[in-house]
Image: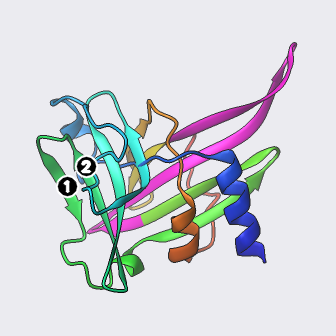
Amino acid sequence: MRRLLKISITILLTSTSTVACSQEGSTLLNSGTNTAQGNGLCNSNEESIFTCLTEKKTASLCLRRHEGNIHIKYKYGTNRKIELSYPENEEGSTEKFKLSTTPYPGGGENRIRFTIGKHDYYLYDITKTESDESGQYPEFKSGLFVLKHNAKVFSQSCRNDASITAPAFEILKEEEFKHDLGINH
């Protein structure tokens, strides 16, 4: 029931998108053009779970259903050149990605985490209720960040309305949400 409620809330609060980042942080963001549209860097036989458009690069988390199996792959780069693709093998790929959520007033935060070497990658979307003299309104943020030994080495906001879509909540295993990462989105 709790999972169904999370899925319902997420569907209401978010839209389709994908996020990615480089293994070594911002070093790969300095060249290229961001021309990804719709499904981001996902192939025609894949569904985007999250797609983040940065100034020059795209990060996509792609889902592929094949012969009763489910495969997930993170891709980062441009339509011309994928600079990072993880994991290499499809087998057991869903186990490499973990989902965590936490509620906020008027919304919440969703994260997908995966690890490559000493780097923890996080794709996130946040919905919060903000207010000013004209009243209350929802505020949406999304992006990605990378930690190495719990220290931030990379952070990038999405230019699009990226959000983690419902299939992630149905497929990925949940882990405890870490509030103490010291990340200010």
Q: Nearer the viewer, residue 115 or 58?
A: 58
Q: Is residue 185 visible?
A: no
Mark 1 near mark 2, Cβ–Cβ under 8 Å? yes
Q: Assess whether residue 129 is covered by the magenta stretch.
A: yes
Q: Nearer the viewer, residue 41 or 26?
A: 41
Q: Which residue is mark 2?
A: 76
Check residue 7 in the rendering and tell me which mark sits there, or answer none.
Answer: none
Q: Name the amino acid type tagged 2.
A: Tyr
Q: Name the amino acid type tagged 1.
A: Leu
Image point (49%, 71%), residue name: 98
Circle 2 crowding by C-alpha within 10 Å: few under 14, some 14–19, many from 20? many
> SS at mark 2?
strand
Q: Nearer the viewer, residue 75 or 98?
A: 75
Check residue 84 in the rendering and tell me which mark sits there, or answer none.
Answer: 1
Quadrant showing the N terminus: bottom right
**Would you place residue 10 above or below residue 91 in this image?**
above
Image point (72%, 61%), residue name: 8
Q: Quadrant of residue 45?
A: bottom left
Q: Assess whether residue 156 is covered by the magenta stretch.
A: no
Q: Which residues are magenta?
A: 114-142
User: Which residue reaches farthest left?
Assistant: 80
Judged left or right of residue 88, residue 8 is right
Judged left or right of residue 175, residue 5 is right
**Would you place residue 173 above or below residue 150 in this image?**
below
Residue 100 position, x and y percent, is 59, 66
Residue 57 position, x and y percent, is 26, 36
